[in-house]
Image (spheres, rainbow, N blue to C red):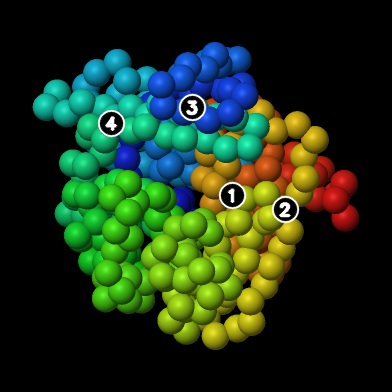
Amino acid sequence: MKPILVVGEINADLIFGGCPRMPEPNTELLAGSFERTSGSSNMLCALGLARLGEKVLFRGLAGADDAGRYCRSLLQARGIDTQAVELRADLQTGLTVSISSPTDRALLTYPGAMTALRAEDVSDALLAQAGHLHVSSFFLQTGLRPGLAGLMQRAHAAGLTTSLDTGFDPALQWGEPAEWIRLLRHVDVFMPNEREACAIARAARADQALDALGNGATLVVVKCGSRGAVAKDGNGPRLEVAAHVLEAVRDTTGAGDAFVAGFLYAWRQRWPLDRALAWGNACGGLSTRSLGGMDGQATVAEVHALLARAS
């Protein structure tokens, strides 16, 4: 298969793990661990895909600074093609502070260069090198967002399949229904988490969001964290697959991005939907073994082993 082209933001994470609980105003917590690592959803998804053996191209912008060079080196270390990654002197690489407890996490992000990328920065020549286009962090990428429907349409015209993971909307606006109708007609796989799906669909529950977001063509997958995932393919029935319970959860940062990597890996193999959901759940669960969203990402052998133990 042709490589997966991941288009999107580049930023680093400063992760404070082992916190007993989430911080409260006018209080101070002591973290049990600290690490600098890959931050952006697009980077984490690309890294997870590469760990599974997928060939990955990355298109993004970052500052010509220490953080930008660091992020590019992380991608290159996993064998990801970074020829389309630009480090520009007029930009500053974004940064996220992640605070993680055993059951939750909170993020504080400085966007920096992640707002600079535009749909027209993704050339037809670059699309021609790929077999699939993936984009995460829809709401954070304010430069890319207006032209994303057109980019997805160009990808389809070039023979690529497409996928989208929204991420959280800091403005809590969640887009207009007309915008989602226009965009999703060009998206093959749509993968918000439960809170995002319900907010976008103006629904109270994940099953209601699935029904509201369905357009008869797009595969909608809703990530439900420790409960697993639920999906609906076109006009087909809803399918729910439970998550795999792991004994020790160190950090949930990037678990959703790992799910997306595992799901896309299986979906691109044309495996049945329940198997693809199981792969997503397995990759998401295994990613929580380590601090940050990168070091715990699963290999194919580790997913096979987990699924074998669970069967």
Give whichever of discs 4 and 3 has the lower sequence position: 3
As rendered, which of 32 and 77 lies closer to the eye?
32
Which numbered disc, 4 or 1, marks the residue that appears first in the sequence? Answer: 4
Q: Distance of mark 4 from mark 3, alpha carbons?
A: 19 Å
Q: Which mark is residue 259?
A: 1
In the picture of the structure, the residue carrying the numbered disc 2 is 243
Question: In percent of the image, x 29 and y 58: which residue is there?
Answer: 173
Task: Out of 8 and 29, give the one closest to the viewer.
Answer: 29
Tally of numbered discs: 4
Task: Answer with mark 1 or mark 2, whichever residue precedes in sequence.
Answer: 2
Query: Is the residue 248 above or below the residue 145 in the image?
Result: above
Residue shown at the point (21%, 26%) measured from the top left: 92
How would you rate the neighbour count of disc 2 (Cα within 10 Å): few for under 14, some for 14-19, many for 20 or more?
many
Query: Which quadrant would the C terminus be assigned to in this image?
Result: bottom right
Seen at 45% across and 58% down, the residue is 196
Check disc 4 and report its element: helix, strand or loop.
strand
Q: Is residue 112 left or right of residue 189?
A: left
Report the residue marked by disc 3.
23
Which residue of the protein is positioned furthest toward the front in this rendering?
26
Q: Position of residue 272 (x, y in %)?
A: 69, 69
Residue type pointed to by label 3? Pro
Which mark identifies residue 110? 4
Query: Could you say which disc has been placed on residue 109 in the image?
Result: none
Callout 1: SS: helix
Three-letter amino acid code at disc 4? Tyr
The answer to whether residue 184 shows anywhere in this view is: yes
Which residue is depicted at the point 58% across and 28% down?
Answer: 21
Q: Earlier in the sequence, mark 1 or mark 3?
A: 3
x and y, in percent, of residue 10 in the image: 33, 35
Amino acid residing under circle 1 = Phe
Q: Secondary structure at mark 2?
A: loop
